Image (tube, grey):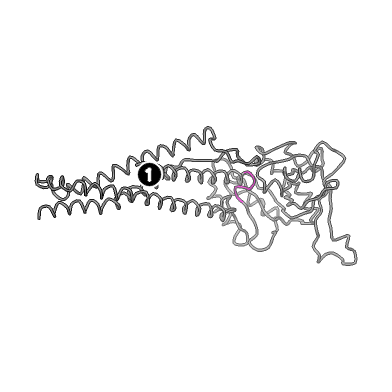
Amino acid sequence: MVGIAFSTAALIIVLSVFNGLEDLLRSLYTSFDPEIKIEAVKGKSFEASDALLGKIRAVPGVAIVTEVIEEYAYVKYRDAAVGAIIKGVSNNFIDQHRLDDHLDEGSLVLNEKGAPVAIVGRGIKHALSLALDNDFDMLQVITIKNFKSVSVLNPSKIYSQRSIHPGAVFSIEKSYDENYIFLPLDFVRDLLDYGNRRTALEVKTSTGANTTQVQSSLKELLGPSLRVLTNEEQHKDLYRLLKFEKFFTFLGLSILISIGSINIFFSLMMLALDKKKDISILSALGGGRSLVLNIFMSEGALISFIGAATGLLAGGAICWLQDRFGLVGMGMENAVVPNYPVRLSAMDFVYTSTVIILVTLLVSIYPANKAAGFRATEQL
């Protein structure tokens, strides 16, 4: 019983941690990435005319359409410089409220007093030693132009450079904080000479709208030249990997439960040998084969069910305590969350219980049949 209980509790705890990690990833990606993203199937950018934007805004369920130009750049501040990904967004990006809960300092604005303002990741801020209250030093954004349109005789025209004041710092997760800078769309468009081309359109759906239905409507409207992705589809490889890890972990721990259930097998075999004479007496009193089978099958079920129930309760209680009080920390100062995230799922309890029941029935069949055979032998 103790072995079954420990294995069951371990399985519930590990599966709950995977659920918590999945929820954590979804919350991080939802903060940074849009509900629906429209991008080109071929090439890096596409023409986003006013007519196209108007048709997208007219789709039922679409609340905000943010124009995006994303490109690699070289950013410099005083004597420090780093490579970064600049993300030019239209002013309605602020209305999506994706960075509201992740603001470290400053104000979430892209224009202040008529001047463009940058929203910088915390990692970039530390790398460049940015000072938001310094009005004299500006952030220099440098990109490389298309070589086909540049004269080789004048290398200085290979680069495009503009200055902007850093106005806010966001902090979501290390990979974002150390790489991304949000800039006004007009600033990046002029810097890269993009015109009406955009690398993506980010859609926020209205409250209560069905994201899948909005996605289907957009696909029908835009045709095969543009790809329409939900937030989960934007990171489908990562989510798929997480589900594979959870499945194989469940499979591995289920094998451990099966190994632990071997104890039930040997216990029932020893019980059958020990009760050989009692089985004969029971047979002489009129007990049939099915009665002996039921006794030993019930014995195996009793052992596993009590152990499983104890393990399910213990695993659920530990996960609840972890979620409520944070018993086990991440062990890292810069971790996204201080404690291991957990989330209990009813289906995990169902799957675990099903595995235990099936394993118990399988390991109990042979000892029960062996005990019934003792009855037949004694009669002979």
Q: Seen in the image, is 22 located left or right of residue 174?
A: left
Q: Residue at x 67, y 49 (%)?
A: 175
Residue 281 placement (x, y as % from top left):
12, 45
Residue 268 placement (x, y as % from top left):
26, 48
* 62 versus 220 height, above or below: above
Residue 236 placement (x, y as % from top left):
56, 54
Q: Residues within 10 Å of mark 1 (few under 14, many from 20)?
A: some
Q: Seen in the image, is 245 located left or right of residue 117?
A: left
Type of amino acid under label 1: Gly
Viewer-closest of 129 and 89: 129
Q: Which residue is mark 1?
A: 3
Q: Quadrant of residue 71?
A: bottom right
Image quadrant in which the N terminus is located: top left
**Residue 180 lies in magenta, yes or no?**
no
Range covered by the magenta-colored residues: 31-36
Q: Give the SS element for disc 1.
A: helix
